[in-house]
Amino acid sequence: MSLPWIFRMAYRDSRRNRSRLLLFMGSITAGIAALVAIYSFGYDLQRNVDDQAASLIGADLQLATNHKPGKAGQEFLDSLQKTANRSEEEQFGSMALFTRTGDTRFTQIRALHGAYPYYGDLETTPAGAAPKFQTDHAALVEKSLMIQYHAHVGDSVQVGNRRFRIAGSLDNYPGGNGFSATMAPVVMIPLDDMASTGLEQVGSRTRYLYYFQLHTDADALVKASQPTLEQTGLDATTISDKKESTGRIFADLSRFMSLVAFLALLLGCIGVASAIQIYIREKTATIAVMRCLGVTIRQSFQVYLIQVAGIGLLGAMLGALAGIGIQQLLPRVLKDVLPLTIHTALSWAAIGQGLALGLVMALVFGLLPLLSIRRITPLYTLRSSYESGPRVRDPWRWLVYGLVLLFVAGFTFIQLRELGPTLSFTVGLIVAFGLLTLVARLLMTVLKRVTRTSWSFAVRQGFANLYRPNNQTLILVVSIGLSTALVCSLLFIQQVIVHQLVLSSSKSQANMILFDIQARQQASLDSLIRAQGLPIVEKVPIVTVRFTSVNGDAYPDNPHLQHAFGEELRVTYRDHLTNTETVTAGRWTGQAAAVPAVSFDDRWAKNLGLQLGDTVVFNVQGAPVKCIIGSLRKVEWNRMQTNFRVVFPTGVLEQAPQFHVVLTRTPSAAVAARAREAIVRRFPTVSVIDLSLILSVLDELLDKINYVISFMAAFSMVTGLIVLIASVRNSKYQRIQESVLLRTLGAGRRLVFSINALEYFFLGLLSGLTGILLALAASWLQARFLFKLTFAIGYWQPLALLGLVCLLTMGIGLFNSRGVLNRSTLEVLRNEV
């Protein structure tokens, strides 16, 4: 028997069952569609990043620093300007007051001077606003902010002490995206008007940026100027740097999305493996006849292996076509996280990867049920009632298990390219599947033991169908349960994060912070706060310092410490610790000594390589202050309260230039809005942040992230539904036989319908409940050990999802079983089932 005969036999044997095989092919199609779309989108991202990297930075070279350049730095900047076009920008956070409506919002102020951007555009409405706003001494306000506060072109926005006419809405700008607009919407003003705002004062966190359009190679210039850059504290970014960093970020995003799609494909392949197992069991008689006619075990195995390969290849081809369509949707789904415009193109590499992956996975997961063909002998033709041979340990099964595990780990490693995360993901996947399998088997055993003869016949039979031979309980619990777990995990984590901020609104916590308060403003501001009927919960002085040396070394080898030396550090002084701080090492005194003993955050000190007793010299506004590390503290950074990496004792920094932070509490959002408006109108240089604003921003941000991840999780849900439909269809013929037998014994159609409805309801309840419990466990572990947050969630959403899963399972099951009730009882006597 030649190879062509084997292919013809595989084709002919599949004709009667082709519809069932095609349905299970759909579960592979869903997973491959997701992967092809994501692979194609990944290639689109890389191509577009390469094409648009210049517009992301807006210049050939960007130099940035957190403090005004000194003499050497200014001379270097001036030397570059001789052969290049130059623009300047100052970025800082400040309140913006919309004078017509009285609304206030903490924003990112970008004070610009020059023709920036040199690549790309400041897209505005109206279109001509960008070139004129500097000369007109006007402002550009981010579009989302304009919409939120009902602002119009021609209105005024107050920044510090200066009012600016709104020349236009800022629709797009280099590096802007939906996330940045949510966290810190931009108000762009002329740099020439910066002094009139009064915002440049002690404590201002300003970032100074310089943009150059060069006529030479930027990377070569940066390499040659590296000693000067290090000396002046200027951070350089070129187009190639931006291309590399942006490409790395989006590569990580693509890998994450690929893993989510891979989960959908895994579910589909598990469904295929289950289908093939039942399919081969039903083909036992056919295979036995083939054996009687002289077909060898190898040839029989090859016939059905070709069928499995056909399922995988056809499913992958359909999935690739669907993936091309989904590829067009992804730029819209991810528009809030992309700082560039994505132009899609057909990727043959992605299509080839999808085809190969679908074929390989179908073969790998189909091998396990195909091994049973090796135990089918010609004797089965005489023992047709004998459903399965003796259970013999097959060493080949362990080889296939190892092959599946190796494939999963290999694919994950290709995506993550790191051994640790690969092992974590693979082990987590094994644990999730193992727990779902264990729960399914355990519940089947429990149902078998708890079923009582005193229960109604419909309930007993519905429970019995869950553990009967050839049941689909295991595969459906795994597929639907894992899909439900993915969606519920997203809901739980979002609720945990938001709940942590809601806790901060309790009566014992402040929920509004006022900062950038100068000493001359403090008394008047206190009076205004009390006039609004608000308490002053806490007043905190803040001093800006820098590292000068550690243990006498001004040039440490530790890269983390080197970075800390280049940054400004905000510290406070007091004689006590707050309720968010706990001493973990050393002793806190709170009183100055000959050499002041300061307290460091323990995790930050460990990261910098510092320990108790180390000597640190700080530059306090030009004056050196020598200190020792007297204690280490554990700080609860997730509390709505001022926390510091370094705390000084009293009697050291009182005379240093400083600004203050005031914490207060508002009873409602309306009171908070009135207080914000009154404070910003009276003290325009003071910034205000309240909890309601943080909650709304975080909610919006999490919704955007959730939307992206939910889009990917939907593939798992779709795959689970396909597996559900296919599993029900696969057992339809057995259900027909059971139904006919019940009706032959006197059961009516209503009773048979009730039995099927109860079975599918129990199956949906079992699958959904298992997935929710798994999500609860996973979310608790993440909250407890990853986010270090209190686990507290609402239960109406998972309960609603559980109800939806139950209804879908029951509805699909009854819809696919509708033909069962239409079969005549005479069919069982004619043996046509």
Image: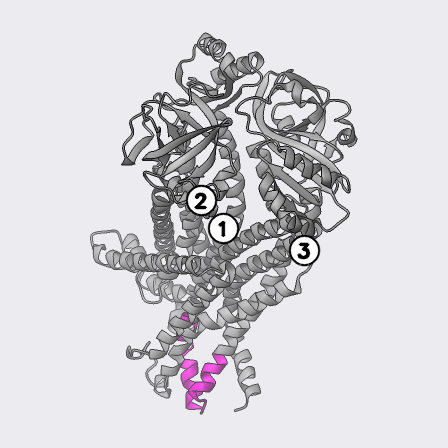
Q: Amino acid at mark 3?
A: Arg
State which tag comes first along the sequence, 2 or 3: 3
Image x and y of residue 833, in percent = 42, 70
Tell me if label 2 and label 1 are in contact, CB under 8 Å.
yes
Image x and y of residue 11, in percent = 55, 78
State the residue position of label 1: 713
Q: Amino acid at mark 1?
A: Ala
- Nearest the eye: 355 or 12: 355
Task: In the rendered structure, find residue 47 and report the number of the disc placed on it.
Answer: 3
- Nearest the eye: 362 or 676: 676
Residue shown at the point (52%, 74%) measured from the top left: 309
Tell me if label 2 and label 3 are in contact, CB under 8 Å.
no
Tell me the quarter of the picture where residue 730 sits. bottom left
SS at badge 3: helix
Q: With respect to residue 549, does 17 lie above or below?
A: below
Task: In the rendered structure, find residue 490 and report the number of the disc placed on it.
Answer: 2
Q: Amino acid at mark 2?
A: Leu
Tell me the quarter of the picture where residue 170 sits. top right
Query: Which secondary structure type mostly characterizes the magenta part of the structure?
Result: helix
State which tag comes first along the sequence, 3 or 1: 3
Image x and y of residue 46, in percent = 64, 55
Image x and y of residue 118, in percent = 75, 41
Q: Which residues are magenta?
A: 277-304
Q: With respect to residue 230, does 667 lie above or below?
A: above
Mark 3 or mark 1, which is nearer to you?
3
Q: CA distance from mark 3 to mark 1?
A: 26 Å
- Nearest the eye: 54 or 595: 595
Q: Is residue 7 visible?
A: yes
Residue shown at the point (42%, 52%) measured from the top left: 809
- Nearest the eye: 624 or 104: 624
